[in-house]
Image: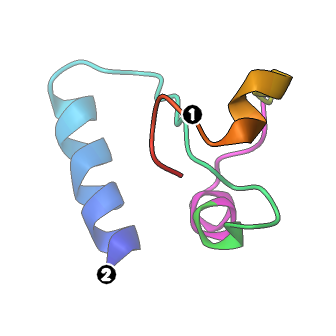
């Protein structure tokens, strides 16, 4: 179902004049499904984003829930 929804969105995007889609999906080892989905649709890894967390974040005072 996810692939059908993504395909429909991409077709609508193209009909509106879009020509390049960039996906910012979590696809690391903890969440492999998004990576497999987008690769199955022909997307490839262009770059990766890394998040660095300071020591103060390890004490439980996270700005966002995990």
Q: Which residue is mark 1?
A: 61
Q: Secondary structure at mark 1?
A: loop
State yes or no: residue 65 in magenta: no
Residue 44 on image: x %, y %: 74, 44
Compared with 54, 59 (above or below) is: below
Give the left or right position of residue 60, taking residue 23 as reference: right
**Residue extending furthest bottom?**
1
Q: Which residue is mark 2?
A: 1
Give the left or right position of residue 37, taking residue 51 as reference: left
Residue 21 on image: x %, y %: 46, 29
Range of residues picked out in magenta: 35-47
Q: How is the image coloured?
A: rainbow
Mark 1 Cα shell of 10 Å, populated few (<14), some (14-19), many (≥20): few
Q: Secondary structure at mark 2?
A: loop
Mark 2 Cα shell of 10 Å, populated few (<14), some (14-19), many (≥20): few
Residue at 45% across, 36% down: 64
Residue at 62% across, 49% down: 26
Give the left or right position of residue 62, taking residue 45 as reference: left
Residue at 77% across, 56% down: 28
Q: Are marks 2 and 1 in contact (CB under 8 Å)?
A: no
Residue at 69% across, 55% down: 27
Residue 10 falls in which quadrant of the image? Answer: top left
Task: Using the rendered image of the protein, determine whether residue 53 is visible from the camera's viewpoint.
Answer: no
The quadrant in which the N terminus is found is: bottom left
Q: Between marks 2 and 1, how big is the CA–CA gap?
A: 37 Å
Task: Using the rendered image of the protein, determine whether residue 24 is visible from the camera's viewpoint.
Answer: yes
Residue 4 on image: x %, y %: 30, 71
Q: Earlier in the sequence, mark 2 or mark 1?
A: 2
Q: Nearer the viewer, mark 2 or mark 1?
A: 1
């Amino acid at each position: 179902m996810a692939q059908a929804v993504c395909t429909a969105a991409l077709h609508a995007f193209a009909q509106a004049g879009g020509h390049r889609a960039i996906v910012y999906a979590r696809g690391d080892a903890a969440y492999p499904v998004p990576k497999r989905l987008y690769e199955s649709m022909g997307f490839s890894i262009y770059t990766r984003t890394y998040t660095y967390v300071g020591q103060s974040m390890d004490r439980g005072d996270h700005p966002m829930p995990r």
